[in-house]
Amino acid sequence: MYLLVMGLAGSGKTTLTGAFAKWMRENGHKVRVVNLDPGAEHLPYNPDFDIRSIVTVEKLMKEHGLGPNGAMLKASEVIVENAKEILKHEAFKPFDATVIIDTPGQLEIFMLRHEGYKFTSLLKRRAPTVGVFLVDGSMVYNIADLVTSWMLGLLVQVKLDIPTIPVFSKSDLIKDRSLVEKVVEDPLSLTEDIEKSLSGVTAELAIEMARLLAEYRQSLRPVLVSAITGEGFEELFSVVHEAFCSCGDLS
Ligand code: GDP
Ligand code: MG
């Protein structure tokens, strides 16, 4: 299967990719790791395939006089133009291993654009593909942060049409752990708090979002994970497996 690790810049994709791959190997599972970020500088893992062997943001910036975002846009095009060749690489063989794919730093410049959709479509054609969407737990200060960042994971799921597991990353840094745990267990438990902390129509909107989260929590439950302490890896593994079984049935 393919496991696409997604999330906003700095949410912990690369760190989790390395730590989770190591954990899976230590627990007897076969894993291959792909770096799909042409802007990556240092990787905490040894990739089986590295997109930087084909394109790097740094080189595009120099050659075309582009800024980092322009170069990443261009790199996204290069990735998709070469996708069929890239997918022929041994690392992408999906049937004897879980292929964990670390996606480009900035979600909005690849995964949320048509290029990300095209690449994901090619993966899906070959094997069941599951996403994890990282929400940076250390950036959750209040209810609005929680609801909106988790919601972004649902948007990604719709956009890419793959089961996408919400993951609260950096659980070792979460400030208000009881708030996060409460919402993760039961998003609607916060209806009263939302009414108190947000105003009028905005509160109504947030409650509607919480209702959606509660509904879809039934099929893919969120997981709190720390790449530093290893908290939540076992739980993440089992949710990935459940998602794999459900998308395996569909394909
Ligand atoms: P990416 O841009 O999503 O790939 O994010 P990175 O994996 O590069 O992580 C961004 C920063 O968060 C780095 O400084 C990491 O060391 C830090 N980080 C990532 N995961 C964790 C975690 O679980 N706990 C803590 N404390 N820091 C983390
Ligand atoms: Mg990264």
Image (cartoon, helix red, strand yellow):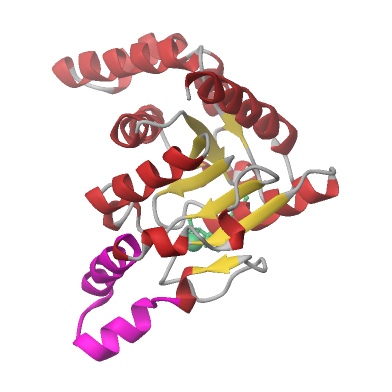
Residue 215, percent from left and from top: 41, 10
Question: Does residue 84 belong to the magenta stretch?
Answer: no
Q: Residue at x 24, y 66 (%)?
A: 73
Quadrant where the N terminus is found in the figure = top right
Q: How many marks can you see? A: 0
In the rendered view, tell whether residue 156 sits above or below residue 189: below
Residue 110, by quadrant, is bottom left
Instruction: Report the magenta stretch's main SS.
Output: helix
Q: Relative to residue 190, is residue 246 drawn left or right?
A: right
**Image quadrant of residue 24?**
top right
Q: Is residue 1 above or below residue 197?
A: below
Residue 175 visible in image: no
What stretch of residues is rendered in magenta? 54-80
Residue at the location (31% across, 32% down)? 155
Where residue 218 appears, as percent x and y from the top left, is 51, 12
Where is residue 240? Give x, y as percent.
Answer: 61, 31
